[in-house]
Amino acid sequence: ALSPQPESEVFEITDFTTASEWERFISKLEEVLNDWKLIGISSGKPLEKGVYTTGAWEEKSDEISFADFKFSITHHYLVQEHSDKDGKEELVEDALPLPMQDLLCMNNDFPPRAHCLVRWYGLREFVVIAPAANNDAVISESKCNLLLSSVSIALGNTGCQVPLFVQIHHKWRRMYVGECQGPGVRTDFEMVHLRKVPSQYTHLSGLLEIFKTKIGCPLTPLPPVNMAIRLTYVLQDWQQYFWPQQPPDIDALVGGEVGGLEFGKLPFGACEDPISELHLATTWPHLTEGIVVDNDVYSDLDPIQAPQWSVRVRKADNPQCLLGDFLTEFFKLCRRKESTDEILGRSAFEEEGKEVADISHALSKITEPAPVPIHKLSVTNMVHSAKKKIRKHRGVDESPLNNEVLNTILMFLFPDAADKLADGFESRTSTSAGNNPPPENEDYNLFSQFKSAPSDSLTYKLALCLCMINFYHGGVKGVAHLWQEFVLEMRYRWENNYLVPGLANGPPDLRCCLLHQKLQMLNCCIERKKARDEGKRGSTSDRSPGGTSGDAGKGADHSGDNPDREKEVGKSWESWSDSEEEFFECLSDTEDLKGNGQENGKKGAKEGSKDPVNFKPEGRLHPHGKLMLLHPGEPLYIPITQEPAPMTEDLLEEQSEVLAKLGTSAEGAHLRARMQSACLLSDMESFKAANPGCCLEDFVRWYSPRDYIEEEVIDEKGNIVIKGELSARMKIPSNMWVEAWETAKPVPARRQKRLFDDTREAEKVLHYLAVQKPADLARHLLPCIIHAAVLKVKEEEALEDISSVKKIIKQIISHSSKVLRFPNPEEKKLEEIIAQIMSVEAIIARARSLKAKFGVDKCENEEEKEDLQRFVNCLLEQPEVAVIGAGRGPAGSIIHKLFVNAQRVAAVPPLDEELRRSGSPEERRLSAGPLSDFPPPTGREVILRTTVPRPAPYSKPLPQRMYSVLTKEDFRLAGAFSADTTFF
């Protein structure tokens, strides 16, 4: 009626001025029912058992308004497979509408999870009209009646057989009235909701009476009433089961004992019982009136005798869990704005700050004419003076971390320091050569998905220590304090040529987080500096161009003890330089170095541009197979070359930005090529030094064999000879290779300009570490913490074996790997990951709680144990679980015992009111009598059904149903009464 149509066609209908708001409302309602195709006969099969819980429910919504009052109209329905068309033709002519058949269906009484109208009336499909705004309500009787009559007219006009409900009163009361119409029949849905229960309706006999009165059936022997009864008992006090999770013993941590927690491990489990209540529902599904007696004096309804038991557990809302707390607190660090200095108090570090500035300018100061006293720059001195100043400004006890905790952590992070104290210098290096990774497995390789760090690395351990300090030892101040100590340790190791332990060898691993890469970079610098400072002893293995040094000679890094630290410090400063033109001829034994090979060659020397060209071969590694030089005809030697500079991802990014900014012009491209050819030039110079008289073709045959094309030709004498030439790309005029070859001088690697200036790079890394705020640190290390949390959750789940948790863990891993792979992930996404980890922790804690309560581990009979384990797993995953064997099965007898014990405790006169929370004064007086195994039921639900002719004896027999629920502060009757509209 309201559909807009062109004026010319239906001119006379467009005038709606006479239509009232009420008529428009009805017409709009009919339009929505038509749109949703709810018109005509509803057909379907009788419902199977439990389908209301297992099936999928869907809903559609729309908005309609009565004048300016908005209503939302929602269609709720159970998704069903459509029966084929042939079935429709077989419909009985005067069959009752489907909703009326559902009223009598007994397969889905008391569904554990469903819309309240489904629970009260057993309907598979219905439409609800409710005020759109939450605070609106239809309260006056006249408005309720107006809405009901609108519904009645709309149903009559459209022939819709789906029940239509109107929500009245305030929303929290869940009061609905409604109607369902079929051919010649109508069902009215009515409701009573009271806060105080009239005493006659607290038992079955009173409810039967009200039901019969309401039906008002004129037949004298009334057809029998079918009944379904459910009594629900709640267990709140698990008296004999204290919560098994012990909080970690903080004091024991420092002593190295395991107080449920140690450095390098994350805690796990709930601090409070994650299961707050157990609800036992005892059900009598099919009773006929007269079989049981239940009145105000006596009741046959003994829960032990109930044919069906089902249990649900009420989970504590967001139980406090240790792992979740750790993660959340650490995540909060990311939002802090303060720098380390601000947190630790700037005043305590002012002078130290100046000395740090001295160090950052150390490179430029060395090249100044004024002599720089080395002892002043020594970081060890600086640390001591800083500590003295700190003590001056605040008592020793005031520092955020006490010495005992700090030393424990530093020993955990740097185990080689302990070895050094015990066995002198050598043992420190043996452990610091980097951990060998454990056998490849899925869990170990998680770091590459999460962009964190391997689980045996220093970075990973540091993350766990910071997480624990943040939680237990002084929060953000403790974090700042440990970080400062860590940075000082890094500086000390750089100065004294100690490798950093717990890092894999080789260049920075770009699969790891940036902080881990920076520490690896520092290790590369220390390695090269050590090679320069001490010279390598022992021969090294063969090396091809572009190959990495690997671990050559690392075991022999330090021969003999070196107790005099000051001498070392001084020595390291001599080799510091910011000057690109400096030579490193200061190394004494050149012959020894030459024989020593690539490690020292590549780490060493700078370009000797001022030297005359030396034709004596230098810097040879070994002959290259049987290859000969093309012109002199001597063997071709592979030179000792410098290794390319290792790079972290931020340096790579910086470099690519610089190269990209050069643009696409010819000049830009040329400049870019030159910038990228530093390594090539270095290798050419080494090659020339090792092979006097060589040409570019010789170099290409070694460096890029594919660019040297050989073919067989017949010479003048008729012999087949092999003739070679450079490839087409090498012959392009002003080719970069040719240019580089022409500019290259024969300079061995040890006298070339360093490709990798370890001094400068190390200073950059140390500066980068020093300026990190606790928030930056938390952001760097959060992937490691999430990685550790996932491993912890996996380890704990393996003990419980819960299938649903396995799925969630897989989701967490895939979600995390997407989020953490990119720099600066969104906070919201990180919060989601942490929430998922917390939910898994809560599920595992619940599983443990239930296992303890049901004594799964104590059960000796294997079969019973399996049944109990299955029962516990179902309790976690399903809203309600049927107890096999009801009160007599293994689970049933345990539940019975739980209730009996709780009753005994409740019956003991309380020393303290806290001990006894349940029961009103009347109940306490009652409990003085013989003690019952179960408390009074918390909820009583009764469904009464019958089929009687109504309103007259000759009317069609129609379904009548009344549902009643009685709880402590709530009494509700929901009735569906059908009447014959043809014969009345």
Image: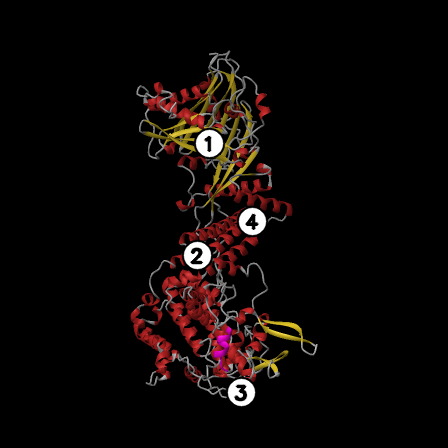
Examine the structure image and report whether residue 703 is included in the region drawn in magenta. no
* Gap between marks 4 and 3 measured at Cα: 75 Å
Q: Residue at x 49, y 58 (%)?
A: 450
* Gap between marks 2 and 4 measured at Cα: 23 Å
Give me the disc on residue 802: 4
Q: Earlier in the sequence, mark 1 or mark 3?
A: 1
Q: Secondary structure at mark 3?
A: loop
Mark 2 neighbour class, 10 Å CA radius: few under 14, some 14 to 19, many 20 or more: many
Q: Secondary structure at mark 1?
A: strand
Q: Is residue 443 left or right of residue 394?
A: right
Q: Which residue is mark 3?
A: 615
Quarter assignment of residue 882: top right
Pointers 1 and 3 in contact (C-beta within 8 Å):
no
* Gap between marks 1 and 4 measured at Cα: 33 Å
* Gap between marks 1 and 3 measured at Cα: 94 Å
Q: Which residue is mark 2?
A: 327
Front in this rendered view, residue 587 or 805: 587
Quarter assignment of residue 28: top left
Pointers 1 and 4 in contact (C-beta within 8 Å):
no
Q: Which residue is mark 1?
A: 76
Residue interval drawn in magenta: 737-745
Q: Can you tell which of label 2 and label 3 is closer to the viewer? A: 3
